[in-house]
Amino acid sequence: MKTTIWTVDKNVDKQEGYQQIAQAAHFLKENEVIAFPTETVYGLGGNAKSDVAVAKIFAAKGRPSDNPLIMHIADKNQLKDIVEEIPEKAHLLIDQFWPGPLTIIFRKKEGVLSEKATAGLPTVAVRMPDHPIALALIAESGLPIAAPSANRSGKPSPTTANHVFEDLDGRIPGIVDGGSTGVGVESTVVDCTEEIPTILRPGGITKEQLEAVVGEVRVDPALADENQAPKAPGMKYKHYAPNAPLYLVNGTQSFIQKLVDEKQKQGQVVGVLTTEEHQGDYRADYIFACGRRSDLKTVANFLYKVLRSFNRSSVDVIYSEMFPTEGVGQAIMNRLMKAAGGKIIEETSEK
Ligand code: TXA
Ligand code: MG
C-alpha cells in the first residue's frame, strides 16, 4: 500500500489546506484509516462506528484487541450520541478542558459504536482534541473518530509525521502532516463513571488541574503497583521501550557518570538521557538532552523524540535521569518507568 502524505499548514483556513483535509476525510468516510496530528501525539483515526475501519487500526498498529480506543469528536454535541449519560463532574471538566488533552470515560450508549473500538466494555473513552487540523478532519468526516496513538504497538508515541512514517509506511493509506505536536505525551485519561473521578493514565492535564475543578480526584492504585491490573487496559503493556535496556537512575550526575564509565570499560556503547541543564556534565557515547528540567513541559515535549533517537543510535544500554512527579512530571515518570520496565538504580543502595 502506498502511504500518501498531505502536508497541511496548521492554519487550515487556507483553501489549499482544506482540499487536503477533504481528501483525508474522504478516506475516513470510506472506512480507511488515516494518521493526523493532535495537540498531544499523532493519532491513527478510523470511523468509530465501523468494525471494518476499527479492525484496520488494530491491524496497522499490531495492537492487542483487548485494548479499547479513544473516540475523538470535533463538537461537544457529538458526545450525547455515543454516551449514556454525562455526569455533573464530567460536565465541569468538559467546560474547563475541552478542547484539550483530557480523555473522559463514560458509560457508553449501546449499539452506536463498533464493539471492537470499545473492546466490548460497557464504557467508552472520549476526547475533543485541541488541534485545528484534527478538528477540521473530524468535522469534515462527520463521524466520531476512533484513534489510538499512531505508532506500532510498544513503540514510543509519534510526535511528528516522520515518526508515523517510520512505523506505518506501507501499512496505512495516508498521513496528514501538520508539523510537531505540542504537548508531547498523551492525554490524561480520567474515569467519570463513579462519584470520585479516577485518573487511569497521567497525561497533559495534571491531577492538580483536575482537582481545582472537581475537588477530590483519585489515581488508579495499579499505576504504582505492578501486581494490580490497571483499569485502563492499555496501561498493562510494556510501552515506549527503546531497543536497548533503559535504567532510571536516582542519583547525582557523578554517580551516573560512574555507571557509564563501568559499562564503557566493558566495551559497551552507552547512552545518557538528560536535560539541557546537565548535558555538559557527562562523557558518554550518546548524550540526548530532553528539554529543560526547569520547565517540565519541555521534557514532555521531547521525551518520545529522544526515546526514538536512542533507537537510531547503536547504544547497548541507556541511563536516564529521573524527574519530580509534580504536574506533568507525573506523566513523564509514568512513561519513563514503562520504558525502563520499572528498573531503577538507587545511588544510596549502591554505596
Ligand atoms: O493523547 C491521546 O490520548 C492520543 C491521541 C491520539 O488522542 N491517543 C492515545 O490513544 O493515546 P491510545 O489508544 O494510545 O491510548 C488509549 C488509552 C489506553 O491505555 C486504553 O486502554 C485506555 O485509553 N482506554 C480506552 N478506552 C477505555 C475504557 N473504556 N476504559 C478504560 N480505559 C480505556
Ligand atoms: Mg498509545
Image (cartoon, rainbow, N blue to C red):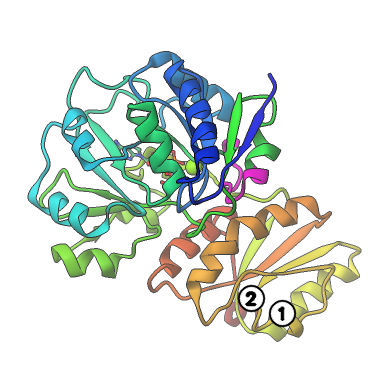
The quarter of the image holding the C terminus is bottom right
Residue that carries the numbered disc 2 in the rendered image? 275
Residue 332, percent across and down? 49, 63
Q: Which mark is residue 279?
A: 1
Q: Amino acid at mark 2?
A: Thr
Please state if 14 lies on the left or on the right of 245 as rendered.
left
Residue at horizontal 39 percent and vertical 59 percent from the top = 224
Q: Which residue is located at x 40 percent, y 39 percent? A: 136
Label drawn at residue 256: none
Q: Nearer the viewer, residue 97 or 142?
A: 142
* Location of residue 339 by image quarter: bottom right
Q: Is residue 134 magenta?
A: no
Range of residues picked out in magenta: 152-163
In the visual, does 67 lie left or right of 87?
right
Q: Position of residue 185 (x, y in %)?
A: 48, 56
- Asked if marks 1 and 2 touch (Cβ < 8 Å), the reply is yes
Relative to 288, residue 100 above or below: above
